[in-house]
Amino acid sequence: MALLTAKPALALAYFTYFGVLGIFVPYLALFLDGRGFNSQQIGVLLAIVTATRIVGPAIWTGFAERSSKPLRVMQLGAMLACVGWLGSFFDYGFWWLLATLSLFSFFWTAILPQLEVSTFLFLNNDTDQYSRIRSAGSVGYIVLVMSGGWAYQQYGSEFMPVTALAFLLLLVFCLFNLPPITSSMDSSSKTLSYTQLFQHKILWIFMGAALLMQISFAPFYVFFTLYSRDLGYSGSETGLLISLAVAAEIVAFYYAGRLMRNRSYRLLLGICYGLTVVRWVMVALLAHSPWWLAFSMLFHAGSFAIAHSCAMQFIQQVFPRAQRGRGQAIYAGLIFGGGGAIGAYLAGLSWQNGSGAVNTFLFAAGFALLACLLILTLPKKIANMAN
């Protein structure tokens, strides 16, 4: 029997899921650096690991669609992710860690698409409630980022395996306490094949722009902690900087539903992507100043939180009701998987152990600019693809 009602259980699931990412995303490069890998190896390793997210979401979503049990898929993925992560405790070199992290990443992709779809189903597509529940994930992220900065100073980069495993186990507990969430869809709900889905120009424009944006985020996700360390910031200071970004994200998520009401995705995403261009330029040229760097972190409210909320609503609006899980899988796979892999590989090549940091973030600004220009070609009103 579940110990929690649906809304608190969903909020706690987001808290723990993104809490794991609060350790994994900012500190993985420091962990790999501590294991003796150079920036090119780190870039290649993270690119290959991230590439598992391209196919993973589609495979797991296929299981969820056929079984009509997305909760069971999430639970299985979380348990297997714990098993995959255990390999990080052992230092057997590059190929061992590549295999370990790839397994972890593949199983990890079973969770979020099903969690997003289940949340929207339970909330009956209520954007305001979704944004508030989703903000619990940002709180989890910020807690672990700040704790991780302190732990890195105290224990070094090897703090990561134990801390991440503890939150992975907590996530498993949360998922086993989610109440059953069933879809109200009937067998007559209209569906489209992948070929039919990708015949829609609007989908190509949106996904293309989102892919470019994810590529632009890769230097920040992969190398920002190393960048901060090289600039003389302590682990705690780096944690505070990232936490400031996530704090802005929490506020933005809380008000995202109201902000998006009766406004076009083209306008909101254009503004968010334009702010991201400014953000990466500031990180490239003004990061030596803690005040300017801290100010740049506030842009995360638009470049991630509002942009992500728009993306979730785009999927809910554009994809047929019966295939919103597939829409989430495409978004998680092609955008976060494909964009993250491409961005990590390119960032690894241009970083050059820190000497190419400024140029890398300027390249990121260029990708964000391309995304902004592309998203502005969307029509003002967007219809469901099944119509």
Image (tube, rainbow, N blue to C red):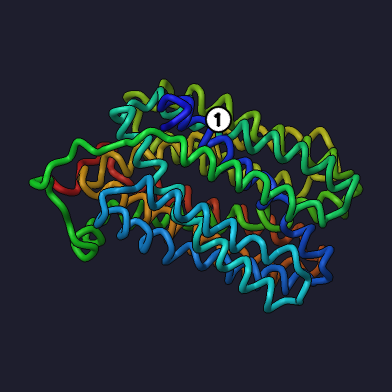
The C terminus lies in quadrant: top left
Towards the viewer: 293 or 51: 51
**10 Å neighbourhood of mark 1: few (<14), some, or many (≥20)?**
many
Residue beneath the point at 34% across and 33% down: 264
**Number of dots carrying numbers:** 1
Residue 332 placed where, x, y %?
Answer: 44, 54
Residue 282 placed where, x, y %?
Answer: 72, 44
Residue beneath the point at 65% across and 29% down: 247
* Residue furthest to the front: 1
Towards the viewer: 264 or 102: 102
Residue beneath the point at 80% across and 56% down: 226
Residue 346 visible in the displayed image: no
Left or right of 341 in this view: 155: right
Amino acid at circle 1: Ala
Residue at the disc numbered 1? 136
Taking 207 as reference, is 259 above or below it? above
Towards the viewer: 47 or 372: 47
Residue 261 placed where, x, y %?
Answer: 35, 24
The N terminus lies in quadrant: top left
Towards the viewer: 302 or 331: 331
Dividing the picture into quadrants, the one containing residue 251 is top right
Left or right of 207 in this view: 384: left
Mark 1 secondary-structure assignment: helix
Dividing the picture into quadrants, the one containing residue 30 is bottom right
Residue 269 visible in the displayed image: yes
* Residue furthest to the left: 188
Residue beneath the point at 71% across and 50% down: 26
Residue 171 placed where, x, y %?
Answer: 56, 43
